Amino acid sequence: MTLFVLRRFLGFAVTLFLAALVIFTLLDLLPGDPAQFILGISATPEKLATLRDQLGLNAPAYQRFFGWIWGMLHGDFGISYTQRAPVAGLIWDRLGVTLPLSLFAMIISMAVGLPLGIIAARRRGKALDTAIMVLAQTGIAIPGFWFGMLLTLLFAVTLRWLPPGGFTPWDENPGLAFRGLILPSIALALPQASILARVMRTALVDVTGQDFIRTARAKGLTMGQAVWRHGVRNALLPVLTILGLQFAFLIAGTIIVENVFYLPGLGKLIFTAISERDLILVRGATIILIIAVTATMLVTDIAYALVDPRLRERGAP
Amino acid sequence: MRRILNHPSLAIGLTATALFALIGLLSLVWTPYPIEQIVISRRFLGPSPEHWLGTDNLGRDMASLLMAGTYTSFLVAALAVAIGAGIGVPLGLAAAAWGGAVEWLVLRLSDFVFAFPAIVVAILITALFGPGAINAVVAIGVFNIPVFARVARGGALSVATLDFVAAGRLAGLGNLAIAFRHLLPNIMSLLIVQGTIQLSLGILSEAGLSYVGYGTQPPETSLGLMLRDAQGVFLIHPWLTLVPGLCIVCIVIALNIAGDGLRDAIDPRLRQGQTNVVA
């Protein structure tokens, strides 16, 4: 088990290092001189040279790259050119919206998708199963952000139950902050819940046909007990893989849904940074997204091994 | 043909998909009005005989925009599938045919690419070159590469154990010939099914990317861009949001039904949980 976890951690570190290299190489080719951009066209060559020096743009590329990595390991993501504030702090503020949003969406999609999948599998071939699967098929086809627009129309404009957009910071009023995230989380959760319902159903149907369920029935359990005690745990394996991937993509998906509700999350920060060509900020925000995605996959892998001891013994799936 | 008719869902899905694709293609030669035609005095009109789906905030004809937008969305998604399959399938085949270090490298590479969600790739390209439809193509295409690599490898591995492949080896065929002459034709059906799924995911991703401003740019239009244009006025004129959104939903459902049907028609044993993950 230790070896397995160590290998996974090593893979995680290598992936992040290579991702940082890719991001750095791409953004280092960015056309346009950031110093020129900050100072405007009328800047004197002397001023430009001084600023380039201050920003460390004169150092060789490899020095800047390792400087960046070294800084990140110490929580220093550099200083934003345009906002004149530490990138780490800017991103941290925005994660206060983006992270809870993805987390809520995940919880909602599990709370809705998994039970629906289990019900559909237990009623396989019946009308209820068909109804749930039609619902899931439709849910998968609906873009989350568009669903968010529809939710706003219904709950914010027509019924006036929830705010149509905007965000009150957590430290000002946690209740209002939470209310602001309800509709966006539901919008994000819809496609995910649909996928989860389908995967859960298929996995449970597969498991139900297996010998150990028959054994459990033979020793006197009812079908419901057998499925609940033995089936669901085994069916959770494929579901877990999907969950990990989903959470990773939820974090990316929030960037789009934030736009509908005018939420001050990572998406807004990145969009502004790009239009102002704030290279350091774009670099920091993208690497944070990739860290989030990769870390989620790492946790999933380890959780997978915890749930399924067979994988632990073999070393790696 | 009979195989298609034996599977009603396949017939329905394929017909609906073809219909949308045709509507999109038609926009290349004919739309009711030119999509760039801005008539401010005729904006926010409801559906009428002159404007079947009404007009948008700039007085452009919604039906024309929808046709052109459908074309762009299909084109972006199809090119992204072409990139994904064009690079991913050879990688997957190489992994299956050579095995060993090649396989290890391909698997690690696909793990690595999985760490870049389409939106992150789109952000990076936009930071470099500015926004455009081509960004969406590349971003979604990159995301498709590991998907196709894995499907191709998985399919090829199960074919590679069959006798005719061993016979080919005995006949002196090299890995390259085995991969393209024996493995590829036998996993074609798998790849077509996956292609349909990726096409529907691509249409959803294009919509998302264009909606946040990293994809298609005016004067071109796409279904996602129409939603972006409607964003500012959707509380007062929800119609402008409903039309392109419903169009996306219908196209994606059509593609998914076609994909499920194809899978059943080609090989009922493949009927398993589809692990669509939306980028």
Image (cartoon, helix red, strand yellow):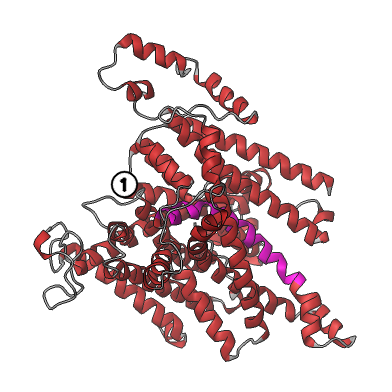
Asked if residue A193 is among those painted magenta in the image, a careful observer would answer no
The answer to whether A127 is drawn above or below residue A150 in the figure is below
Magenta residues (range): A233-259
Residue B59 in sight in this render: yes
Furthest residue toward right: A219
Residue drawn 54% across the image and 35% down it? A89
The answer to whether B73 is drawn above or below residue A65 in the figure is below
Furthest residue toward front: A172
Q: Quadrant of the C terminus of chain A?
A: bottom right
Furthest residue toward top: A46
Asked if residue A234 is among those painted magenta in the image, a careful observer would answer yes
**Amino acid at dot 1:** Gly
Residue A223 in picture, x, y percent from top left: 78, 87
Magenta: main secondary structure equals helix
Residue B87 in picture, x, y percent from top left: 48, 50
Say what secondary structure mark 1 lies in.
loop
Residue B149 in sight in this render: no
Residue drawn 29% across the image and 12% down it? A44
Around disc 1, counting alpha carbons within 10 Å, would you say few (fewer than 14), some (14 to 19), or many (20 or more)? many
Residue drawn 46% across the image and 15% down it? A54
Label 1 sits on residue: B132
The answer for which chain carries disc 1 is B
